Amino acid sequence: MSDVIRFGVSLSKKLLEDFDRLIAKKGYASRSEAIRDLIRENLVELEWKGGAEETVGTITLVYDHETRELGDKLTHLQHQYLGLVISTTHIHLDKHNCLEVLIVRGKGKDIKNIANKLISIKGVKHGKLITTTTGKKLT
Amino acid sequence: MSDVIRFGVSLSKKLLEDFDRLIAKKGYASRSEAIRDLIRENLVELEWKGGAEETVGTITLVYDHETRELGDKLTHLQHQYLGLVISTTHIHLDKHNCLEVLIVRGKGKDIKNIANKLISIKGVKHGKLITTTTGKKLT
Amino acid sequence: MSDVIRFGVSLSKKLLEDFDRLIAKKGYASRSEAIRDLIRENLVELEWKGGAEETVGTITLVYDHETRELGDKLTHLQHQYLGLVISTTHIHLDKHNCLEVLIVRGKGKDIKNIANKLISIKGVKHGKLITTTTGKKLT
Amino acid sequence: MSDVIRFGVSLSKKLLEDFDRLIAKKGYASRSEAIRDLIRENLVELEWKGGAEETVGTITLVYDHETRELGDKLTHLQHQYLGLVISTTHIHLDKHNCLEVLIVRGKGKDIKNIANKLISIKGVKHGKLITTTTGKKLT
């Protein structure tokens, strides 16, 4: 890491103690590393706000594959967003339940769009969109 | 604010510039105030306690594969939690950046544990855990 | 690699020349490394012959997701072999065609069984079973 | 056999013992004869030439993640063929062994090229390329 800069943060003793306990639990090597992660997390959120920038996400779905035509519906919908869906991993949880994780890349608003459509299909028990980043803007 | 303490944070010039732009946009009066908010948000997150029940989740990581030995570190750590990690999907985002999505299944607290360890490794730019469900209790 | 042993191989000049061209093309660093790979490949085949040993494979399928109920059939069949299928990755090749790659682990004969069933389903355009290994017996 | 040449092969004691058992089972009169057969089989395989047409394939690798820097080497190589590798699924087989399945799409000769490079890296115990089809020409 070239061009390292150092700046001071002031906060209450109580908050610092809580923070130290938190980062010890999470396994960070230093406060700086933990703070850097918090900042990057915040920048990623910003990347998603506008909606027009290219970004990356995962969509996690849990559903019962025995629900009539549900699997086919999910597949058809994904094929309509061809450029967006890079890959889908499917885990057979038990006789009935499937976990499906889509990796998607595109404009934030398009990703949100397909996520909403998939999650709202009848028979999908649980769905979540994770918004991450192409990593290009983070150091 | 009684008992105010001051500590130093070191980070790259680029990351600090991005952070300054971000907090200006958000209207923060100072870096300290912004950092304090980030810490407080994080403490709330911690409230969620992983339990002893079996659950399913995904851990999403973005990192630069050129960071020295980072890929090996991530793989070794995952092998230590053998029963927990079902599969890992890796997408090569560009020349530098990788997206890795782990599908995990086990006790909530164990899942949280490995997620924290992976995300806090130096060189991981962004990481997120989501826990979903085995679907068994949902109809 | 401890306990390294060296033995001599005799063959015709012509065959050696062909072999040298082959390994140059494949990018091997030495004849020994190439020969070791050939031997290991042969041992893996043997691991599969008996059928009762635990082993690992991948099943690759290409199909048109618009074929009626095909996706559902494939999913249902996989759920019947729950313990066998670790994960399935699905790539949307174009508006019609899907690539599905199953990673399977179990007895060789059970793996062959599910592979045959999946590949023979009407609508599956192309299917292949790759037999690899748990790696435990190879050095 | 005129023009007979002799060269040395070095390998671990364990691998040689496995090989000796294998060729005894198969009824070979000598190691040289067995090795010559392995080489000839391999030359036949080479006959298949990857062409200029777009195709789809999977590359399956088994390796020990504890081999020094092997994971990093595999990742770096894959990043050099960015457009080619759609996704990689990684399964942690046991404390030592990894299964990695790459889904690749591109010109047949490029796919063959990266497969050869990956499989010939020292430490990869077993590797196989299969090419399937984009499904476009099949009905």
Image: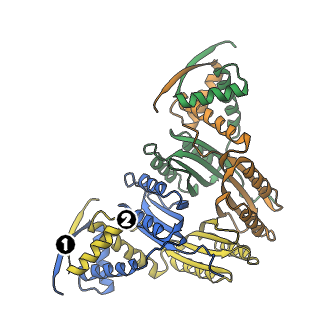
Chain colours: A yellow, B blue, C orange, D green
**Label 2 sits on residue:** B120
Q: Nearer the viewer, residue B107 or A51?
A: B107
Kind of residue sitting beneath label 1:
Phe
Element under disc 1: strand
In screen coordinates, is C73 left or right of A11?
Answer: right
**Label 1 sits on residue:** B7
- Where's residue C40, x and y in %? 61, 36
Element under disc 2: loop
Q: Chain of mark 2?
A: B
Asked whether residue A135 appears in the rendered view, the answer is no
In screen coordinates, is C94 left or right of A31?
Answer: right
Q: Nearer the viewer, residue D100 or B139?
A: B139
- Please tell me which residue is depicted at 72% across the width and 65% down the height of the picture: C79
Q: Residues within 10 Å of mark 2 (few under 14, many from 20)?
A: many
- Please tell me which residue is depicted at 66% across the width and 19% down the height of the picture: D30
- Where's residue A107, x and y in %? 52, 75
- Where's residue A18, x and y in %? 28, 77
